Image: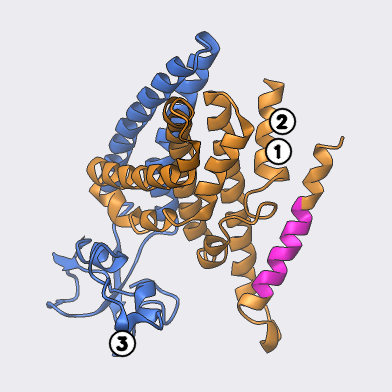
Amino acid sequence: MAWLEPEQTTSCHGCASASSCGTPGIGTVASRMQVRRFPLDNVDDLRVGDHVVVGVGDRALIQASLTAYALPLAAALSAGGVAEWLAGSDLVTMAAMAGGLALGLLAASLGARRLSRRGDLAPHYLRRAKPGETCGTNGERA
Amino acid sequence: MKDFALMMIGAALVNNVILARFLGLCSFMGVTTRIDTAAGMGLATTFVITVSSMADWAVQHYLLDAYGLGFLRTVTFILVIASAVQFTEMTIRKVSPTLFQMLGIYLPLITTNCAVLGVALLLVEGRMSFIGSTMFAFASSIGYSLVMVIFAGLRERLALAQVPRLFAGPPIGFIVASLLAMAFMGFSGISTG
């Protein structure tokens, strides 16, 4: 087992004012990426500091997005629609939508657990990165 | 029911957020190099626009209108949107750390998406009921996602096409976007019969 840390390639790195900017590292995308580590099967005797290229399934991002966003939203809108049809009051509809959203998030949690168990969301090791190869240089994600 | 359906079609297709109102153009050009990325961004934006529009409606009616604070609308809505994004990020991190690892990178970018604020301000002008404004926001964001995915599909094909060097990259992207906008103008015929 190895821990994979994404490379920091944010818009900050490409900005003309990067050298004079004092904000990188404080609540930026870069600092968020630093705390985002993935477990990876160590099939190639990887050591700390090795650069590797990984890939995720074609449908992984869509599946994850549908689970995280579409499911809670569908639950909230359905609950709101039913409440509006039954009660016809803004306050009742609002409460029903909030309840639907909470239920939807619960369902999303269960769905995400199922996807994780099946390994659908996990990145897979492809190969070691070539010397000097960085994220996006050949269209692959690293 | 028919009014709702017409209003939603109008918000999604006729008055499309990107191609008719020219909002959210930075993500339109920036995140549409791959279909799955565009769809991920579209769904995340749909979620944030709908949730923040629900909160914006409550703030507008029970705070700004009630206390005559309409002049603080823009600032308040920006605060509500930032809070909605933060809430979404925290919830997804709590609900599923794995999902957060995959999708969390998109969320901070949505805070600065002008389409989110634009839709919230349009809702105030519309003076709709809670369900009406939520459905309008949902339909607007579906229109946004639809255009993002269509444009990403076109750009994926463009990447394989032989384009003259002068037009390669963003220039041909803008030309395709203009053709897509003209195609969407065809939907305006729906409103005139």
**Rendered location of residue B138, percent (x, y):** 55, 37
Q: Are marks 2 and 1 on the same chain?
A: yes
Q: Which residue is mark 2?
A: B6
Quadrant of the drawing holding the N terminus of chain A? bottom left
Label 1 crowding class (10 Å Cα cut-off): few <14, some 14-19, many 20+?
Answer: many
Circle 3/circle 2 CB separation < 8 Å: no
Q: Is residue A47 magenta?
A: no
Q: Colour of chain A?
A: blue
User: Which residue type carries mark 3?
Assistant: Lys
Q: Is residue B183 magenta?
A: yes
Question: Which of the chains is orange?
Answer: B
Q: Which residue is mark 1?
A: B10
Q: Chain of mark 2?
A: B
> Which chain does tag 1 point to?
B
Q: Which residues are magenta?
A: B172-184
Q: Is residue B164 above or below residue B25?
A: below
**Residue visible at 45% across and 42% down?**
B72
Which quadrant, please, contains the C terminus of chain A? bottom left
Q: CA distance from mark 3 to mark 2?
A: 55 Å
Q: Secondary structure at mark 3?
A: loop
